[in-house]
Image: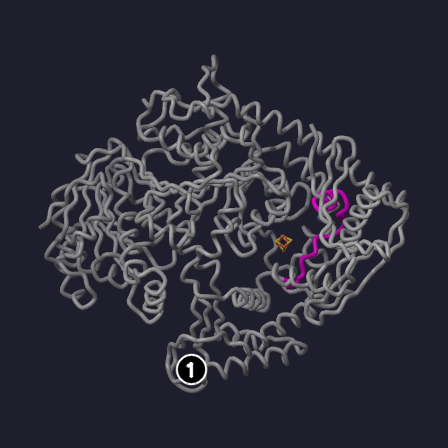
Amino acid sequence: MSYRIAVRALCEFAAKRGDLDLRFTPSPSAQEGIAGHQLVGERRGERYERELALNGTYRHLEVRGRADGYDPDANRLEEIKTHRGDLSRQPANQRALHWAQAKMYGHLLCAERGLDQLTVTLVYFDIVSQRETPLSERCSAEALRAEFDAHCQAFLAWAQQELAHRRRRDRALQALRFPYAGFREGQRPLAESVYKAIHTRRWLMLQAPTGIGKTLGTLFPMLKAMPGEPLDKIFFLTARNTGQRLALDALRTLGAVQRQRQNPEPDHLEPDDIGSGDIGSGDAEPNDSRSGDSRLGEVQAVPLRVLTLTSRDKSCEHPDKACHGESCPLAAGFYDRLPAARKAAVERGWLDRAALRETALAHEICPYYLGQEMARWADVVIGDVNYWFDFHAMLYALSQQQQWRVGLLVDEAHNLVERGRGMYSATLDHAAFRRLKPTLPAPLKRPFSRVASAWRALANDSESDYRVLETLPGKLIGALQQAVSQVVEYQSEQPIALDSELQRFAFDAQHFCRVADVFGDHSICDVSRQAPRGRQRLAGARVTLRNVVPAPFLTPRFAAAQGGTLFSATLAPEAYYRDLLGVPDDAPWMSLASPFRDSQLEVRIAARLSTRYADREASLTPLADRIAVQFRACRGNYLAFFSSFAYLEQVADRLAERHPEIPIWRQASRMDDDARETFLRRFEANGEGVGFAVLGGIFGEGIDLPGDRLIGAFVATLGLPQVNPVNEQMRARLQALYGHGYDYAYFFPGMQKVVQAAGRVIRSGTDEGVIHLLDDRFARRESQALLPDWWPKPIKD
Ligand code: SF4
């Protein structure tokens, strides 16, 4: 069996030495890179050969790649690198890496064409000045071969280890059994659908109710599919940290139970088994909490390498420093110490956040960048959705580079609409710019004053406090681009801390320029300001490139995976998610029946109560009294949801005033992890009281309060986003694109939050509870059509 590797990956493994050096370099965007390559190619003669696919072997290594160009008349192979800024400041180890790559291609070309010598040229193309800087070396075929062999030899032992790991992993996965005697109700069709989707190389949109065991039920079939499809990696992506913990628990369970089982029964999920009705008895209780023992994860029966990716903000050990060797001790000599750390990390196999940090620090390298490296060698990577869907998504970029076959699981996929919008939107806040100005070093004052004047012109262009621009603010964008380049120049002399205002502004400005590059119908550009007059008016100004429909950006990301499943308890209406997410047309949408009985739940609608903005004041006493009546009728823990903190406070105050005997606790507008835990701890078994929270907030989804930790919920308002100029613009754009402006901008997102919040009540087959929907609009047919099928008919009172 041979091991295939791309030239670039091989060089990064074998030829990278020295410091990690990520001084803020606004490297060219993908489009700029492509355009730069094209331009250089066009400047060459007719016989110039572009994009040469090359490959060769070294023992059982198969090395392949694409050289940028070859001029047969000059017998010159060119490797083109686009850049911005002063080339003389390029770190030496990066230059060395480029040479290694170019010479690898040089050898492959010599071998393919029988050349005995060749000129190898690195062509650095500055995308701003459009100037080329060529660096050439005349090389004999023999010297190129020796270099190629040396790099391959350095990788060979690792490749052998990887092949052996892959064999072991796939054997274990073929033998993997579901860790319980049977599936929970609904879990089996869930597992089968996920398996079918990846087996047919498609995406699946899956609405599956709480309590089925979605995490285990999706990971198990994906792992079973891994050897046969075959898949290189599984990425389990979440929009919230709670989902990551559940995924780790499920993986521990799969490995641990396998290890303990004595006489394994053939219980495999093979392609032929799909639909054969013989993969388990389904006798586990939906409330089964056998989620694995964390201790057992340390000894895996299934030799899976599992990695959790954590953001740089959370994993940085020196937030006051910059990511290069002169500033941060964990960046100095990073690549020299990486091989030992990498080896220790693969031996460990299980790299959750703590294990990754421990391994990195034991080798004195940065945990965040070790995580990025280990994504190359892990089998299952758990991380935020942005690692695949964002502009510069690391897992997506690596998969493209390495041509991995990837299966994706996207948990709580309903969040991808808002998260996707956030990824492809950008805001420039004048307040941040003002804070930065007095601290600017002298060399940056002039470029930033150009930004200031472009900004002033834009803000003073109209008397209106909110307006949508017909065209992009070209002058501001041009000034920002120049300012960013100057920051780069400056930073190569002076380290800038990761958390400095200047660094943040430079990142924001660069992101803004990139979003501007891909601006289109899917987005709007608006200028808003809070203060109406004079200088203060500018102080409150914001320019936003606001994505409304992330579909055009997400569609290619779906296509780049072998297949996958988007799953959530609320993925309806189908058309809404299909339109906004851009899921492939051939992706089936399915909704699984709930394991719960309608007798477990009572749903009441306050059909004569209005919580519309104009009626808020009048609603306070009826709301407080309703909560009190329910609490007295059945004492226990309740959650009450409101559309805003202001409304929440008003009702909580009224309840405290009229019914002081009822214990209450409130969500605050900013809560750290400890405060969040304290809030949730109040929901103890057999407890009594009412927790007040906001709809769509941190307690509105992703929290699990089974049994009598929560026996009911009150949901006041339909959760509709506020009517304001921004939302009205979104509505207009969605109306123009899909003909459903109000539903897509207000109604569906609002009802989705309601169902998520109410879904906190019944978490298991033995839970019982009540949901009060507190607004007359819940009694309308269109609202009830969006409530889960299994809910009983609401009682209107
Ligand atoms: S520890 Fe922080 S500053 Fe140092 S390299 Fe890592 S992310 Fe950068």
Q: Position of residue 65 (x, y in %)?
A: 71, 45
Identify which residue is drawn at 39% across, 55% down: 580
Kind of residue sitting beneath label 1? Arg
Residue highlighted by disc 1: 537
Is 184 or 6 nearer to us in this picture? 6
> In the figure, residue 569 lies in which quadrant?
top left
Q: Is residue 56 above or below residue 517?
A: above
Is 354 situated above or below 100? Answer: above
594 lies left or right of 419:
left
Of residue 178 and residue 406, the one placed in the foreground of this image is 406
Query: Is 226 positioned to the left or the right of 740 in the image?
Result: right
Q: Residue at x 77, y 38 (%)?
A: 56
**Horizontally, is 487 left or right of 223 in the view?**
right
In the rendered image, the quadrant that contains the N terminus is top right
Asked if the magenta segment contains residue 651, the reply would be no
Instruction: Answer with the quarter of the image where residue 761 lies.
Output: top left
Magenta part of the protein: which range?
7-28
Residue 387 in the image: x percent, y percent? 53, 49
Cβ of mark 1 under 8 Å from ligand 1: the answer is no
Residue 704 against residue 472 in the figure, above or below: above
> Residue 75 at x, y = what percent?
86, 54
Task: Classify mark 1: helix, strand or loop.
Answer: helix
